[in-house]
């Protein structure tokens, strides 16, 4: 996180603005960024499945995959037909059934610990499932699960190699609406910034949606404005424009 971004966030908050995060990360992996930005309002985690008040260490809103749907997901992956990694997320941790090179790297980069479990289908109260690998392979697995499932679910891409399954209707956008109710904020006064498929609904639902310059064309076409890229301090750029009332 650049100094320019941190300084712009601080300046925005000093004039009365509210700033928070909406991320696919869970509580543990999001906490360093929450602290670095000194965020004092609830954050959206797990791509919208959880709204978390980190000041009081309370979950304000949560959604889980149904047990039947999760067990179907775990069973289809464990058949070994699709060569992608799986990460299973609960409030209490992240579960895998093997520690691959990717998982080792993921734990190091995200500063999290993944717990090893032989039979993933025995888990319950699962928030989301992430497939990592070739995008098309992951989507083929998702399509098979969708065909076999008796209930719908949400699927989003959160990174070039990450495909996630979430509870039906849950997105960062749906969580943003809920968070606005919690904070008593008019969503028309909200600016949402993002660069991935999992940001799309949030960008659309917000009063003013902003796509980063590094976002793909679908995300850019969903936004009201395209700022600079993540390597050019795009978040700082848009916050400064908000402060100067230039939008």
Image: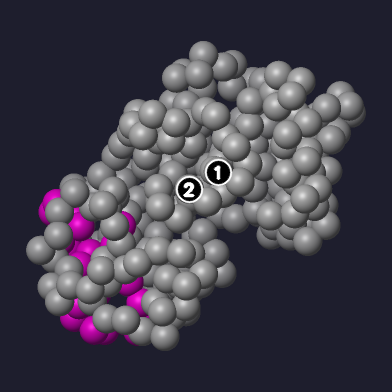
Quadrant in the picture for residue 160: bottom right
Cβ–Cβ under 8 Å for marks 1 and 2? yes
Q: How many marks?
A: 2
Mark 1 is surrounded, within 10 Å at the Cα level, by few (under 14), some (14 to 19) or many (20 or more) other residues, namely few
Segment tinted magenta in the rendering: 67-89
Residue drawn at x 56%, y 49% is 33
What number is the disc on residue 35?
A: 1
Decide if residue 152 is in sight here: no
Q: Residue 27: x and y, percent?
A: 40, 48
Q: Which residue is mark 2?
A: 31
Dot 1 lies on which element?
helix
Mark 2 is surrounded, within 10 Å at the Cα level, by few (under 14), some (14 to 19) or many (20 or more) other residues, namely some
Split into 4 quadrants, where in the image is the N terminus? bottom right
Residue drawn at x 63%, y 41% is 37
Work out whether residue 143 or residue 186 is closer to the camera in this orientation and state it: 186
**Left or right relative to 51: residue 194:** right
**Left or right relative to 64: residue 124:** left
Q: Is residue 98 magenta?
A: no
Residue drawn at x 81%, y 48% is 4
Q: Residue 189: x and y, percent?
A: 67, 20
Decide if residue 100 is in sight here: yes
Dot 2 lies on which element?
helix
Distance of label 1 from label 2 (alpha carbons): 6 Å
Q: Residue 102: x and y, percent?
A: 43, 80
Q: Is residue 123 above or below residue 7?
A: below
Split into 4 quadrants, where in the image is the C terminus? top right
Work out whether residue 55 or residue 136 is closer to the camera in this orientation and state it: 55
């Amino acid at each position: 996180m650049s100094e320019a971004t941190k300084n712009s966030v601080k300046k925005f908050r000093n004039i009365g603005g509210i700033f928070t995060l909406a991320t696919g990360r869970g509580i543990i992996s999001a906490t360093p960024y929450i602290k670095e930005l000194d965020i004092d309002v609830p954050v959206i985690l797990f791509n919208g499945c959880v709204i978390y008040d980190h000041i009081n260490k309370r979950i304000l809103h949560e959604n889980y995959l149904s047990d039947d749907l999760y067990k179907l997901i775990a069973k289809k992956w464990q058949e070994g037909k699709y060569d992608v990694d799986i990460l299973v997320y609960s409030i209490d941790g992240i579960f895998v059934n093997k520690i691959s090179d990717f998982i080792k790297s993921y734990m190091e980069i995200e500063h999290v610990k993944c717990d090893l479990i032989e039979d993933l289908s025995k888990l319950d109260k699962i928030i989301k499932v992430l497939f990592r690998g070739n995008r098309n392979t992951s989507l083929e697995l998702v399509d098979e699960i969708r065909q076999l499932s008796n209930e719908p679910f949400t699927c989003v891409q959160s990174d070039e190699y990450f495909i996630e399954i979430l509870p039906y209707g849950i997105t960062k956008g749906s969580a943003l609406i809920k968070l606005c109710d919690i904070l008593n904020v008019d969503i028309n006064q909200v600016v949402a910034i993002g660069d991935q498929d999992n940001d799309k609904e949030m960008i659309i639902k917000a009063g003013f949606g902003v796509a980063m310059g590094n976002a793909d064309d679908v995300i850019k076409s969903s936004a009201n404005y395209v700022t600079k890229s993540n390597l050019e301090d795009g978040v700082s750029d848009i916050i400064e424009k908000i402060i100067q009332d230039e939008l």
